[in-house]
């Protein structure tokens, strides 16, 4: 089951556990994780924060609770707070690769790609010895490769990003988000012929995801605009080409 399905199925049980044992912080952690999966951010933050504050310092679930709380803050746009919580998680569990991954993602979200690159390297160095928390992938390698790709994308290094994303997809070929990122990296790198099949596959995998449709539309719109500009270079006063360029750009701006 995906996290939201699991959360809906078990939410009442988790809420009952908190009611029956209100002083048990582990119950609040579990409840907060479920609320986060359901997008109930304020409620998730409250439950997770209480769980973290009351947790024994040595509790093995405290670092995962910290990164879950960071995710709740990040979803609300509180990027600095998310970075701080992820750093606290890596400080308590320095060999937990997934914690370093979450720190790197928070740093990317905070527009700090160089620091994110260092965090991804820490994650990769610790992948073999890392302990897993509920929901962690069994193989952290693809996640690190995808993260390094995001660093390159943030820096406008599309060829390098495409290489890392290709490697990540080899390990996790069913991840539609990875495929969509690869398609965009290839398109930005001028490799349109390679990008189109990934856009279409992502669209199929995502079952009509708005992001997949938007990526495919932008891809075709960008190619169409380039074709019109090439036509105008040879026919600078052609009214039909100029009208098409205006329509394309009007559509692109209306979607932003």
Image: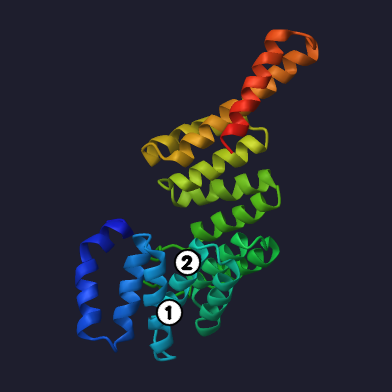
Q: Secondary structure at mark 1?
A: helix
Q: Is residue 210 above or below residue 56?
A: above
**Residue drawn at x 54%, y 49% as measured from the top left:** 167
- Residue 187, numbered circle: none
Q: Nearer the viewer, residue 143 or 53?
A: 53
Question: Image quarter for residue 100?
Answer: bottom right
Q: Nearer the viewer, residue 108 or 187?
A: 108
Tell me the residue that label 2 is attached to.
71
Tell me the residue that label 1 is attached to.
49
Whether residue 4 can be seen here: yes
Q: Can you give x and y, in whole percent of width and height, for residue 72 in the image? A: 45, 67
Residue 4 located left or right of residue 82: left
Q: Is residue 114 above or below residue 91?
A: above
Q: Can you give x and y, in whole percent of width and height, for residue 220 in the image? A: 57, 26
Q: Secondary structure at mark 2?
A: helix
Judge depth for marks 2 and 1 and give the one in front.
Answer: 1
Q: Earlier in the sequence, mark 2 or mark 1?
A: 1
**Alpha-carbon span between mark 2 and mark 1:** 12 Å
Q: Quadrant of the C terminus?
A: top right
Label 1: few (<14), some (14–19) or many (≥20) C-alpha neighbours in 10 Å? many
Q: Is residue 57 above or below residue 118?
A: below
Q: Quadrant of the N terminus?
A: bottom left
Residue 72 located left or right of residue 25: right
Q: Are marks 2 and 1 in contact (CB under 8 Å)?
A: no
**Residue drawn at x 24%, y 74% as measured from the top left:** 15
């Amino acid at each position: 089951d995906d996290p939201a399905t699991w959360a809906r199925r078990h939410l009442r049980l988790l809420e009952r556990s908190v009611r029956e044992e209100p002083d048990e912080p582990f119950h609040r952690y579990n409840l907060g994780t479920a609320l986060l999966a359901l997008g109930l951010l304020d409620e998730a933050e409250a439950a997770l924060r209480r769980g973290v504050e009351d947790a024994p310092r040595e509790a093995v679930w405290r670092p995962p609770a910290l990164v879950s709380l960071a995710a709740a803050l990040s979803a609300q746009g509180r990027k600095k707070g998310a970075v701080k919580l992820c750093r606290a998680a890596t400080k308590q569990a320095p060999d937990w690769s997934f914690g370093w991954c979450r720190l790197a993602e928070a740093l990317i979200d905070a527009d700090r790609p160089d620091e994110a690159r260092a965090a991804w390297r820490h994650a990769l160095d610790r992948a073999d010895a890392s302990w897993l928390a509920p929901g962690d992938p069994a193989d952290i390698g693809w996640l690190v490769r995808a993260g390094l790709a995001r660093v390159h994308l943030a820096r406008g290094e599309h060829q390098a990003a495409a290489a890392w994303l290709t490697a990540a997809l080899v390990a996790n070929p069913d991840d539609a988000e990875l495929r969509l990122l690869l398609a965009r990296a290839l398109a930005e790198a001028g490799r349109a012929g390679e990008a189109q099949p990934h856009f279409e596959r992502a669209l199929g995998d995502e079952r009509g995801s708005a992001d997949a449709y938007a990526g495919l539309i932008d891809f075709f719109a960008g190619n169409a605009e380039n074709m019109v500009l090439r036509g105008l270079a040879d026919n600078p006063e052609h009214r039909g080409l100029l009208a098409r360029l205006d329509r394309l750009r009007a559509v692109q701006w209306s979607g932003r």
